Image (cartoon, rainbow, N blue to C red):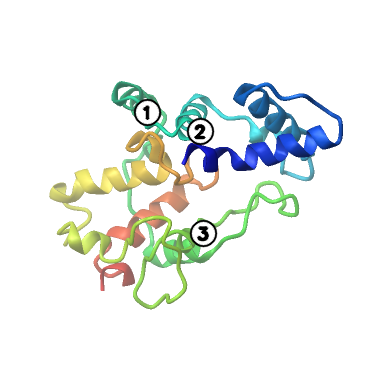
Amino acid sequence: MRKQKYMPYLAVAASLLVLGCASVDGVADIDALTAKMVQTSFRDQGIAKVDRLQQDESNAACSAADASGKPLAPERAQAIEAANLKTVKWPQDGKLLGDWKEGEKIAQNGRGMTWSDKAGSANGGNCYNCHQISKEEISFGTLGPSLYNYGKIRGIKDPGSPESRAIVEYTWGKIWNAKAYNACSGMPRFGHSGILTEAQTRDLVALLVDPASPVNK
């Protein structure tokens, strides 16, 4: 299992050795060579900048754990979640719900943040790439859990009611920064990373919890 995990790295190192570029003594050298190769294989173009390759502390810790084949220690995971929870930006007006119809458009839209996109243009959420969301959509990914009947399963009849506040807040927080609830979540940190706006987050929350949304039909 460990050998298979390092096969891509070994292939990179082997290629460099064949070219006479380096000598490799161990995993640390392989990691360094791979990082250098990745860094030199990209360039700034349009709004897509090389600094996207830089990992913050949370991502770096999870990458290291994945490379080792061992999960994060519970206390480390809790610390990462707590730090990310502090970054969740809650709406100043307290309104967590938007228009589910707009939310569906965002979920279907996979555009944004490429070198050919204009700075300031609205991004999509590309939610169907990882999740089943509505019954009508027949093309969806399975990397993430199914979100069909998300609000219905959780008993949400009136998303604006005090009884539903906790789950609606959780939904907002999960979309804004998934690592606040799962240290090594593979879900993009949509709000934290500036992928989606506050208004777009409202609309996606509504898509998931509004009883009138196709998600809950």
Against 27, residue 115 (above or below) is: below
Q: Position of residue 32 (x, y in %)?
A: 68, 25
Q: What type is the residue that disc 3 sits on? A: Asn
Residue at 39% of width from left, 51% of height from top? 202
For badge 2, the amino acid type reads: Ala
Q: Does residue 217 appear to the left or right of 103 in the view shown?
A: left
Q: Quadrant of residue 209?
A: bottom left
> In the depicted view, which residue is nearer to us: 190 or 138?
138
Residue to which mark 1 is pinned: 72
Q: Residues within 10 Å of mark 1 (few under 14, many from 20)?
A: some
Tell me the residue at 13%/49% (across/down). Answer: 163
Mark found first going from the N terminus, 2 or 1: 2
Q: Residue furthest right?
A: 20
- Residue where numbered disc 3 is placed: 126
Q: Amino acid at mark 1?
A: Leu
First in sequence: mark 1 or mark 3? 1
Disc 2 crowd, CA 10 A, few/some/many (<14, 14-19, 20+): some
The residue closer to the viewer here, 182 or 170, is 182
Question: Which of the marked residues, 2 or 3, is nearer the chain's N terminus?
Answer: 2
Does residue 193 lie above or below 106 as drawn? above
**In x, y percent, where is residue 35?**
68, 30
Mark 2 sits on what residue? 67
